[in-house]
Amino acid sequence: MPRLREIQPVPRLLALLGMTLVAVLVLMFHGPITQSAAYHAFADQRAYWGIPNSLDTLSNLSFLLVGSAGLFALRRGVPAGGLPILRPAYLLFLAGSALLFPTERPLSASPPGRNGDRP
């Protein structure tokens, strides 16, 4: 059996597209994926400083801190041990991590059925 690196780029691309097509078709015929009614029953129900589920929401600060620190470190180039060719991937990952911070409050502050939630 040939190793993945030995396969030419076109067959690899076709294999990837084929797997993607199969996954999309399976999901199309599966129907809606139901969401538990207890989805919004977060562990911390308390509200501090006007923030519902505050400790669950404020725990996202770690994503903001780590993502921001990583972006700050990449400002001067790729740190030791990093691969310069992967700098765009590092930037995307760290920016995505930092942007996770504000996501929980709007969802937890609104009733189920809004912001794309399924009833």
Image (tube, grey):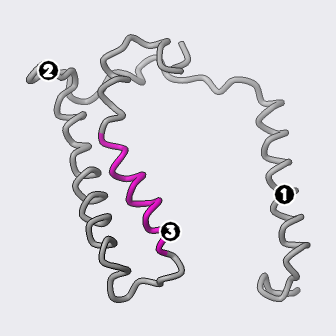
Cα separation between marks 1 and 2 = 46 Å
Q: Which mark is residue 42?
A: none
* Image position of 62 (left or right of 91): left
Image location (x, y in percent) of residue 20:
79, 52
As drawn, the residue found furthest toward the front would be 76
**Please, what secondary structure does the residue beneath circle 3 have?**
helix
Q: Which mark is residue 47?
A: 2
**Please, what secondary structure does the residue beneath circle 1 have?**
helix
Q: Which mark is residue 88?
A: 3
Image location (x, y in percent) of residue 32:
69, 23
As drawn, the residue found furthest toward the left would be 49
Number of residues whose C-alpha sits closer than 10 Å to that of mark 1, classed few (under 14), some (14–19) or many (20 or more) = few
Residue sitting at x 27%, y 58%:
68
Image location (x, y in percent) of residue 65:
22, 55
The magenta stretch is 87-101
The residue under label 1 is 17
N-term-proximal mark, 1 vs 2 = 1
Cα separation between marks 1 and 3 = 23 Å
Residue sitting at x 38%, y 88%:
81
Give the quarter of the image for residue 5. Answer: bottom right
